[in-house]
Amino acid sequence: MDGGKVTVGRTAALYAGVAVLRLAIFTLLPDLPDLLTGRVEISTPVTSFKRLQEGLFLYNHNVSPYDGGVYHQAPLFLPLFSLLPNALSYPIFTYFLYIAIDLLSASALWKIADSGEAGSSALFTSPRRERRWNGFIIAAIFLFNPFTVATCLGRSTSVFTTCAILHAIAKAVSGAPFSAMVALSFASYLSMYPLLLLPPLVLLCFDRQRPERANKSVVSFAASHVPVVFGVLGLLFGMSYLITGSWEFLPSTYGVQLTLSDLTPNVGLWWYFFIEMFDSFRSFFLAVFWLHLSCYVGGLSIRIRRQPLVVLTLLLGIFAIFKPYPSISDTSLFLAMVPLYRHVFPLMRYSFVIAAVIMYASFLGPAFYYLWIYAGSGNANFFYAITLVWGLGQSLLVCDLMFAVLRDEWELERPEMAGKEIRQI
């Protein structure tokens, strides 16, 4: 394992450095947060801080924030941000909240890394498992990732979903299945799509359960823990009803993701396709797109059953590409999980191409959006073309990581083939 001994001082220095960096940018560049908040790469209709402010304004004036069709986020954000002083007059408190959420996410990621689950699960132990980074390095990579920093500065509410997902996985590898289910419930309540992570998370919890509470059947284990997710979701929905006084939040928060009623441009693949779609075919292709997003769950959970953490990582990458309203926050979460598999990096074949494509799209995306919206010298095809390149780069990373993991498993079964070239026929 690389990285050396991690002391309390190094941990405190890392977290302090991260907080100071973010606070310095917030303070020295006061116009930057509002600029990033309006960027389509960072904010989507279901995560925008500006839309949250509009909903909060209506909520504080006893008007339903869901009446205008602008606010599409979870109702519990309203009382949470109401506790903070006015974001315009005293933004420092909002800054502290987002910095704290980033640090909590990094803490959960640290626990996942130090568990060693990525290289040695209950059913599979990689021969390369010793070649890994410790939690300090993994957390630092996440916290200093430009996508993570930009998401924090843009104050996208997706950071709360990221934090809940990472804590669900951290609790699972720690042998605390109940806490993992509760954390996943909060993530699903905030963004809906994390509910698709339930099957591999249940498998991970089953594999990492404590010996004194071991359950020999995965079916009975799932039957006793899956209801926790839906029970907590029901409780959260009930609290949301008490806050808003109606069930309007259901179609406004989750219905907009299911039906894609808001076609604001983003870095995903859905918006342009449905702008061009004839209304008579819309329902059919909505079903096809959602089926495509969800069909990976069963196949990956079965094929890579011995490594459920790999399944979770690959699904997070797939969601970052194919969910209805993706942003760079989803990519930062996926990229935070990838370094856990440093032991299979030598088996990956297209690392340079992947890095080049992602960097290419990262720089050209804002330029093409500017040409389309502000300069008027382009059209929607300009921006959609670069989002396709962006999706291609992430798709290559998902596929290459999956190849490396499967090759690692295969070489353990066929040690005589280690290091040799293979060809699919």
Image (cartoon, rainbow, N blue to C red):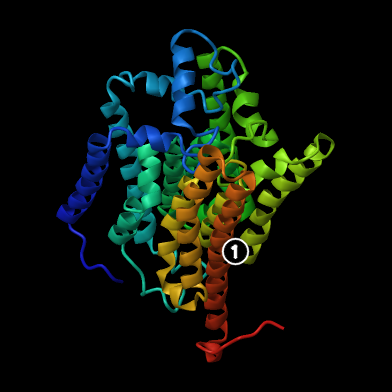
Q: Nearer the viewer, residue 206 or 347?
A: 347
Is 363 situated above or below 404?
above
Please provide percent x and percent y for residue 188.
55, 38
Which residue: 48% across, 49% down?
Answer: 367
Q: Residue furthest bottom?
A: 416
**From this viewpoint, which residue is outermost toward the top?**
62
* Residue at x-position 38% and y-position 48%: 148
Q: Return the x and y of residue 137 as percentages of the image width and height.
A: 30, 61
Q: Which quarter shows the N terminus?
A: bottom left
Quadrant (top left/top right/bottom left/bottom right) for the C terminus: bottom right
> Does the rendering let one see residue 102?
yes
- Mark 1 Cα within 10 Å, few/some/many (few <14, many 20+)? some
| Element carrying mark 1 | loop
Q: Is residue 267 above or below residue 30?
A: below
In the displayed structure, would residue 245 be above or below residue 176? above
Residue sitting nearer the eye, 107 or 266: 266
Horizontal side, residue 85 vs residue 415: left or right: left
